[in-house]
Image (cartoon, rainbow, N blue to C red):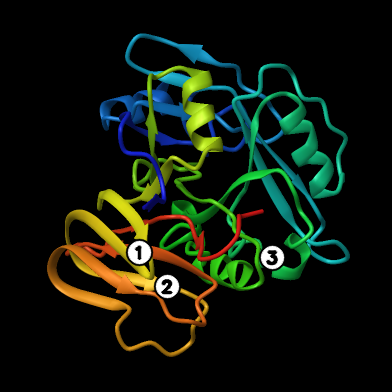
Amino acid sequence: MKEAFRTDGNWYKGNLHMHTLRSDGHLSPEQAVSRYQKAGYDFAALTDHWIQNECETTERFLLLSGCEWDTGDMVNTPVFHIVGVGMDSKVSLERSLPPQKIIDAINAANGIAILAHPAWSVTNPADCLGLTGLGGVEIYNSVSGLPWNGERADSGVYIDIWASMGKFFPCMAADDSHFYQGEETRSYIMVNAQELTPDSIKSSIRNGDFYASQGPEFHSVRFSGDAVRVESSCVDTIIFNSNTVWCQDRVFTGGVTGATYRMKPTDKYVRVILIDSQGRKAWCSPIPVNGEAY
């Protein structure tokens, strides 16, 4: 039996994309962090634009180092926003570098590189097929939705397009908080780790031991033979997405806490979505049916 992520450690809740007065956010770093601490978060990263914030640890809260680098001019070159978290050293980058150079620099500093809001950026999916070293892609970005910045918060279709082409990016959710007018403390990742330390959290993220959520909880996602079994908190809907276009038994509804999906011969991957009675979602990363992820 194969598990999509480990469940035998401790669960830690975190937001890895937020801004402060150091760049274009509306709160001080101390005020921003306080919002998340009061909301029950265990860790976060301040990711101001082109300003690297350092790691700070306390007994009950972990603040990872972080920064957001962007490239592209929206006219002649494609736009990429790359978030880096958990770097052990200062990353110095020139403007207008290609995204792979930014990703490589983050990894060289022992950080985790995350592609931010591809739907908001109107990213061409083909431009990402050659990228290597990404630790995650934001499947949901709170501030990219209504009423803050249009209606391009959900990048799920990008995840499906890439997975259908054999590129399995881990799914993350983040707030990208700027205004702190309701977009904060909405979307996050749940990481299963041994302890609340930078090394433990980063190791679990690199191993894929996490899921993205706005409220619903995954208890387990297990593969056995041709079956995928999900156990969860009580939700209205469980969806099993794959590259198979037509499938009558991928959706389960009605106050469910679990469901089993029988994979189809055409399935290249499966990823699971939970939706609760408030419309909040949770997402696991796409799992290749055969072979290893990139």
Query: What is the three-letter code of the residue carrying label 3?
Result: Thr
Q: CB under 8 Å between callouts 3 and 2?
A: no
Mark 1 → mark 2, Cα distance in angstroms? 8 Å
Of the numbered discs in the image, which one, if any, rests on residue 123? Answer: 3
Which one is in front, 147 or 36? 36
Which residue does the image show at 48% across and 87% down from the upper left?
245
Which residue does the image show at 49% across and 59% down from the upper left?
287
Above or below for 212 versus 279: above
Q: Percent position (x, y) of residue 79?
A: 75, 58
Q: Nearer the viewer, mark 1 or mark 3?
A: 1
Q: CB under 8 Å between callouts 1 and 2?
A: yes
Label 2 sits on residue: 241
Q: Percent position (x, y) of residue 64?
A: 53, 23
Label 1 sits on residue: 273
Query: What is the three-letter code of the residue carrying label 1?
Result: Ile
The answer to which of marks 1 and 2 sits earlier in the sequence is: 2
Which one is in front, 99 or 237? 237
Badge 3: residue crowd in 10 Å (few <14, some 14–19, many ≥20): some
Which residue does the image show at 45% across and 11% down from the upper left?
57
Q: Give SS at disc 1.
A: strand
Kindly tell me whether residue 38 is visible in this rendering. yes
Mark 1 → mark 3, Cα distance in angstroms? 22 Å
Mark 3 → mark 2, Cα distance in angstroms? 21 Å
2 vs 266, left or right, is: left
The answer to which of marks 1 and 3 sits earlier in the sequence is: 3
Q: Give SS at disc 3.
A: loop
Kindly tell me whether residue 25 is visible in this rendering. no
